Image (cartoon, rainbow, N blue to C red):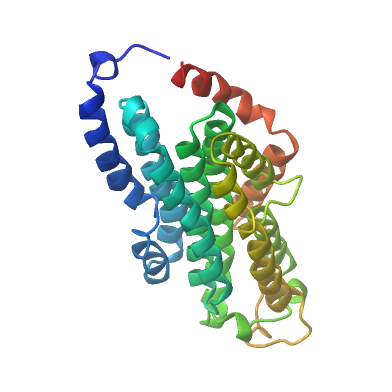
């Protein structure tokens, strides 16, 4: 880790205890930390597809990056002092986002609230502050970014042809648009942490590292994985695998050229799920140095 004058200034513990929660809440709002999260799902619904992809894939990650680099790195004593509160808010966001996502019928709202839950995992890993948890949090930032970008890309493609995002009005997409439906299904499976896809190593590292610091909060957050699997598999079954056509009888598949970006995102999900050390070995030295 390089030497930076501001980080090496040696802020007093008292100042750090005041500054860190301001950093956590300020940047955490951008990362949709509970309870300052409601802007994010609404923003997804109001935004066009490209903006939703940037919102989930880049913008929300800037908030978590700010907490890590400007909160934890500059004010380590404050991060330790406020860790239980930050961990509690993060765990609440994980569970709350999953509970609300279960109730959604709008695809964008469903993905928006699932993003609140997934970003809650990022913030939980940062709050735990162990090397394993921080490694998992940064890995989750990357995996969630490519997963939600692929998800919103597929939803936008279907919306352009059906003018509907209602899950109950979809059906048979795997027959009508097999390539885009495959990307849609792959993004959903990555979102529930299926082994072999990029979400699995990230969530595993977060929970293992989080359990070292917050065993009770970790046990509270883990059931969100079951809720995530429930609503995600239900959506995939209704939209892609159901026999009914819904509003999708005239949906056509994507072309080779326009589908290349989706294939790239899907490939990255598989690559970093099958070979997690490609990324975790890059993150690990920083995580260890940060906690010295």
Where is residue 102? Give x, y as percent.
Answer: 58, 72
The one nearer the camera, 97 or 84, is: 84
Where is residue 231? Give x, y as percent.
Answer: 64, 70
Seen at 28% across and 14% down, the residue is: 8
The one nearer the camera, 8 or 212, is: 212
> Which image quadrant for residue 274?
top right
Residue 168 visible in the current orientation: yes
Q: Does residue 85 appear left or right of residue 161 in this picture? A: left
Q: How many marks?
A: 0
In the rendered image, the vertical position of residue 279 relative to residue 227, given as above or below: above
Where is residue 280? Give x, y as percent.
Answer: 62, 29
Seen at 36% across and 65% down, the residue is: 38
Q: Does residue 277 appear left or right of residue 141 in this picture? A: right
Q: Residue furthest front?
A: 216
In the rendered image, the vertical position of residue 34 relative to residue 246, given as above or below: above
Which corner quadrant holds the N terminus? top left
Seen at 50% across and 21% down, the residue is: 286
In the rendered image, the vertical position of residue 142 relative to residue 93, given as above or below: above
Q: Residue furthest top?
A: 3
In the rendered image, the vertical position of residue 201 relative to residue 113, given as above or below: above
Residue 254 visible in the current orientation: no
Where is residue 89? Give x, y as percent.
Answer: 42, 52
């Amino acid at each position: 880790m390089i030497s930076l004058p501001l980080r090496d200034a040696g802020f007093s513990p008292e100042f750090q205890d005041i500054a860190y929660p301001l950093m956590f809440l300020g940047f955490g709002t951008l990362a949709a930390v509970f309870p300052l999260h409601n802007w994010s799902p609404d923003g997804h619904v109001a935004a066009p597809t490209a903006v939703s992809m940037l919102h989930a894939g880049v913008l929300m990650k800037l908030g978590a990056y700010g907490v890590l680099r400007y909160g934890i790195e500059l004010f380590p004593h404050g991060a330790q002092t406020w860790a239980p509160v930050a961990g509690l808010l993060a765990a609440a966001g994980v569970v709350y986002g999953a509970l609300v996502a279960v109730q959604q019928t709008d695809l964008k709202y469903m993905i928006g609230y699932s993003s609140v839950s997934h970003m809650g995992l990022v913030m939980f890993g940062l709050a735990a502050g162990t090397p394993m948890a921080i490694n998992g949090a940064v890995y989750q930032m990357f995996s969630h970014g490519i997963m939600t970008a692929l998800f919103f890309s597929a939803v936008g493609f279907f919306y352009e042809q059906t003018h509907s995002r209602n899950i109950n009005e979809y059906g048979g997409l795997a027959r009508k648009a097999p390539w885009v439906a495959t990307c849609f299904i792959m993004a959903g499976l990555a979102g529930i942490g299926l082994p072999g896809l990029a979400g699995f190593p990230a969530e595993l590292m977060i929970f293992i590292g989080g359990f070292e610091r917050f065993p009770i909060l970790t046990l509270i957050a883990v059931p969100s994985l079951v809720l995530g699997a429930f609503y995600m598999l239900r959506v995939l079954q209704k939209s892609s695998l159901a026999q009914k056509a819904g509003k999708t009888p005239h949906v056509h598949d994507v072309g080779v050229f326009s589908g290349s970006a989706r294939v790239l995102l899907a490939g990255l999900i598989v690559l970093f799920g099958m070979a997690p050390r490609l990324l975790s070995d890059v993150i690990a030295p920083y995580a260890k140095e940060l906690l010295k």
